[in-house]
Amino acid sequence: MGLILLVPVLAFLFLKSFGSNSFALRTYLPDRVDSTQIGEKWKRDTVFHQVADFILQSQSGRTTTQKDLNGSLYVASFFYTTCAGACPQMNNQLARVQEKFRHEPRVKLVSYTVDPVHDSAAVLERYSEQYGAIAGKWYFLTGNKSAIYQLATREFRLPPPTGEAPGLVHSQQLFLVDRDKHVRGIYDGTDTREIERLITEISILLYTYDHNKSGT
């Protein structure tokens, strides 16, 4: 098991030693393919989805938008506080990610509640304390239910949550969103090996930003 967890880290170190152009993370969620005619040939470029802006409320009661994330990459997730199954597992894993990048201001975490009627800012504040959420680094967000569900379905292409709390069924996927608001990774938030991959791919993006002016 230890060897399996080391594989992504060793792969990153190998790629790092051979320069920043050796590896690029995949971009997810294509929107369309644009075609441009150059002479007698057609050039086709895939245009990838950019996560749209939102206006929600954080656990501190402060209005939060994408502007609070400008210049950062972030890990997005969906949860609710009375979830007794996957959510605690997922948030424990996210606490690991926060600790790994505690001193890296360009890495943030954004957790959207899918039960905003119950999960007020005050409820989220108490809940976030259980996981040691750092203010300004890990945002637990609530707000209008339809806006949050639209965010899940339109921006992250997830199926809508179904049922009622505490039996709400929702995705346990995590999304790595780069500073241009493109999704660069999708992970199972309850799988330790997937979290190791997430940590490695965050490191790859940061390294790319530090060594490649284009930031791609």
Image: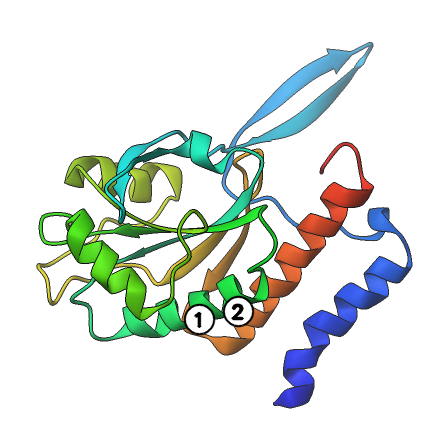
Based on the displayed image, in which of its 4 quarters is residue 4 positioned?
Answer: bottom right
Judge by depth and name the residue closer to the eye, 24 or 100. Answer: 100
Q: Can residue 80 be seen in this view?
A: no
- The numbered disc on residue 93 is 1
Instruction: Residue at 22% x, 62% y: name it.
Output: 126
The quarter of the picture where the C terminus appears is top right
- For marks 1 and 2, the one nearer the N-term is 1
- Residue 100 vertical position relative to residue 65 in the rendered view, above or below: below
Left or right position of 82 against 179: left
> What colouring does the structure picture have?
rainbow
Left or right position of 95 against 26: left
Q: Are marks 1 and 2 in contact (CB under 8 Å)?
A: yes
- The numbered disc on residue 41 is none
Count of labels in the image: 2
Check disc 2 and report the residue beneath it: 195
Q: Where is residue 74 in the image (x, y as percent from the top left)?
A: 50, 48
Q: What's the amino acid at mark 1? A: Gln
Q: What's the amino acid at mark 2? A: Ile
Q: Where is residue 45 in the image (x, y as percent from the top left)?
A: 66, 27
Left or right position of 195 against 114: right
Instruction: Residue at 91% x, 57% y: name it.
Output: 18
Q: Position of residue 157 (x, y in %)?
A: 37, 44
Q: Is residue 123 visible?
A: yes
Q: Residue furthest bottom?
A: 1
- Residue 147 vertical position relative to residue 34 in the rendered view, above or below: below
Q: SS for tag 1?
A: helix
Instruction: Residue at 39% x, 72% y: name it.
Output: 92
Which mark is in front, 1 or 2?
Answer: 1
Cα separation between marks 1 and 2 = 7 Å
- Residue 136 vertical position relative to residue 125 in the rendered view, above or below: above
